[in-house]
């Protein structure tokens, strides 16, 4: 159960009601600070709609962060979103296998993106060998977008965990399909 109440449009000042145009639990909690919600949404919006990074690679990186953080909310939302950007069930299974150190048929760039997300999640950041290998596949703009995307979603999973934000019923089937392994 969330640590703060989920806010609805009618709970917000008229000037802030647009903050819930995407009425998901994350935004319903963030609206406790309208200014923060706007700043958060600006970067999140750029990552989703403005970045020139291949959206499939973006979603793989986000899924890797969600899997590592064992974030039900992030994982379930981005399994669904990933499907919209050509992430397949085989890709998700390969991400889980790659995380466990098992061999996969993923292309080198996909494996490097997952490695970058794992390294940044573990801290302090993407290693020099992984960064340099990514530079052989990505422009500096794409690589910068990738690193900032990973860092942003490392922050998102910590917000989700700290606020104990619940997975909405519409997203539960994705979590059921790909549950986290028992510890």
Image (tube, rainbow, N blue to C red):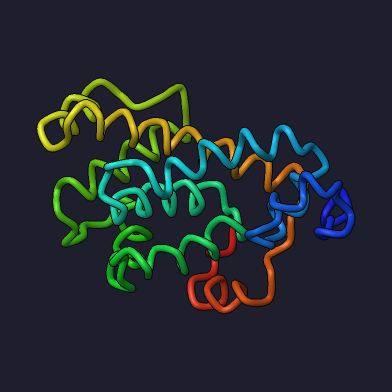
What residue appears at the point 23 percent right and 48 percent down from the top-left corner?
111
- Nearest the eye: 26 or 163: 26
The x and y percentages for residue 18 are 70, 52
What residue appears at the point 63 percent right and 60 percent down from the top-left corner?
22
Q: Residue furthest left?
A: 136
**Residue 156 picture quarter:** top right
Please state if 165 lies on the left or on the right of 86 as rendered. right
Please state if 166 lies on the left or on the right of 43 as rendered. right
The x and y percentages for residue 71 are 60, 54
Position of the C terminus by quadrant? bottom right
Position of the N terminus by quadrant? bottom right
- Nearest the eye: 9 or 173: 9
Please state if 142 lies on the left or on the right of 51 as rendered. left
The x and y percentages for residue 76 are 54, 65
What residue appears at the point 58 percent right and 36 percent down from the top-left corner?
155
**Residue 179 picture quarter:** bottom right
- Nearest the eye: 49 or 117: 49
Give the number of callouts: 0
Please state if 30 lies on the left or on the right of 114 as rendered. right
What residue appears at the point 23 percent right and 50 percent down from the top-left corner?
110
The x and y percentages for residue 162 are 74, 42
């Amino acid at each position: 159960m969330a640590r703060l109440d989920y806010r609805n449009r009618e709970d917000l000042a008229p000037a802030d009601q647009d903050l819930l145009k995407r009425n998901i639990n994350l935004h319903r909690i963030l609206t406790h600070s309208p200014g923060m919600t706007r700043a958060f949404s600006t970067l999140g919006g750029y990552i989703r709609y403005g970045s020139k990074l291949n959206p499939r690679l973006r979603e793989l990186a986000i899924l890797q962060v969600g899997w590592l953080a064992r974030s039900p909310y992030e994982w379930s939302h981005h399994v669904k979103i990933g499907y919209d950007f050509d992430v397949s069930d085989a890709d998700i299974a390969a991400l889980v296998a790659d995380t466990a150190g098992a061999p996969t048929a993923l292309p080198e760039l996909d494996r490097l993106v997952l490695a970058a997300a794992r390294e940044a999640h573990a801290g302090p950041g993407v290693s020099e060998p992984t960064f340099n290998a990514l530079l052989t596949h990505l422009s500096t703009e794409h690589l910068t977008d990738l690193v900032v995307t990973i860092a942003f979603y490392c922050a998102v999973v910590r917000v989700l965990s700290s606020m104990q934000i619940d997975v909405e019923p519409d997203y539960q089937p994705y979590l059921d399909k790909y549950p986290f392994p028992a510890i």
